[in-house]
Amino acid sequence: MPVMAMRMKHPSYLSMLSTQHSALAAILAMVALLSACGYQFRVEGAGPTIGGTSAKVSDGPTPRLVIRTLENKSFEPNLETRYTNYLRREFSSGSGAQVVPDSEAADLVLTGQILSVEVPTLSFSLTPTPGSQTGSATTLESRAEVTVVVKIEETRTKKLIWTQISKGSSEFYITPDLQFNRVLQTRALEQAGRFVAEDLASRFLLHLEAGGTTKPATDVTPVVPATQ
């Protein structure tokens, strides 16, 4: 009868094998945990740019900005107060400037005008009229369109820093109720004004990030001529 022989593995070999298994198990557990948690790696900061140049980051203190009440040159009354409030809210949260009251010291001052308000017809229906070849038209949908221009100057030197025209619009439907139509038009004008304020604040933020406040006034081409 053949004799079966058992070979015992060396204790040091078993210890090394156990250590390798433990390390592998730990790595797999970590990978599973990160995958389950949806872990993502993120690089903060401006990061590298093509060509090896450093990314431009605005530095220095946040400019203090006063926003004066807009001048209303449109036929629509009482828009200037609401539109000015929209500008103050949007510039406070998304322009890169600190909006302060007119009574406080400021580095910059914003002034502007509501240039125009238009309410064109978008769609209409024709109702045949006896004895008429064209019939009568009934407006179904209109659009509120506003145009605003602003400029920002240095408070101390009166140097022009930035100027911009912005247009906003909002559609609304027409109903048989004339009073309700007026309410709808007012809401559309307010929405258009909020769009304008958001647009101007985001544009000025880009201007600041590009170091725009350090440019002389001759480098800024005004959209409209300054009033005398």
Image (cartoon, rainbow, N blue to C red):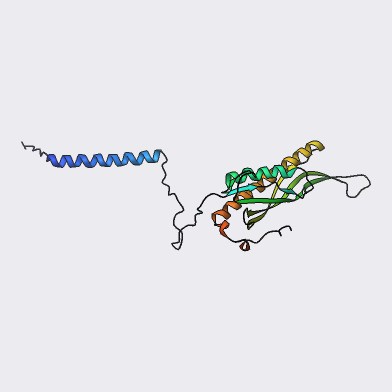
> Looking at the picture, how far across and down is residue 6, in whole percent?
10, 38
Quadrant of the frame with the C terminus: bottom right
Q: Is residue 139 above or below residue 156?
A: above
Residue 7 position by quadrant: top left
> Looking at the picture, how far across and down is residue 193, in whole percent?
69, 45
> Looking at the picture, how far across and down is residue 24, in whole percent?
27, 42
Judging depth in this view, the residue of 126 and 58 nearest the camera is 58
Quadrant of the frame with the N terminus: top left
Q: How many marks?
A: 0
- Position of residue 187 in the picture relative to residue 65 (left or right): right
* Residue 24 visible (yes or no): yes
Please tell me which residue is depicted at 13% across the width and 39% down the height of the picture: 11
Judging depth in this view, the residue of 21 and 170 nearest the camera is 170
Please tell me which residue is depicted at 67% across the width and 48% down the height of the picture: 196
- Position of residue 46 in the picture relative to residue 207 (left or right): left
Q: Is residue 221 above or below residue 85?
A: below
Judging depth in this view, the residue of 61 and 83 nearest the camera is 61
Q: Residue furthest right?
A: 131
Please tell me which residue is depicted at 33% across the width and 40% down the height of the picture: 30
> Looking at the picture, how far across and down is residue 182, in whole percent?
78, 39
* Residue 176 visible (yes or no): no
Q: Is residue 37 above or below residue 144?
A: above
Please tell me which residue is depicted at 88% across the width and 49% down the height of the picture: 134
Residue 81 position by quadrant: top right
Residue 157 position by quadrant: bottom right
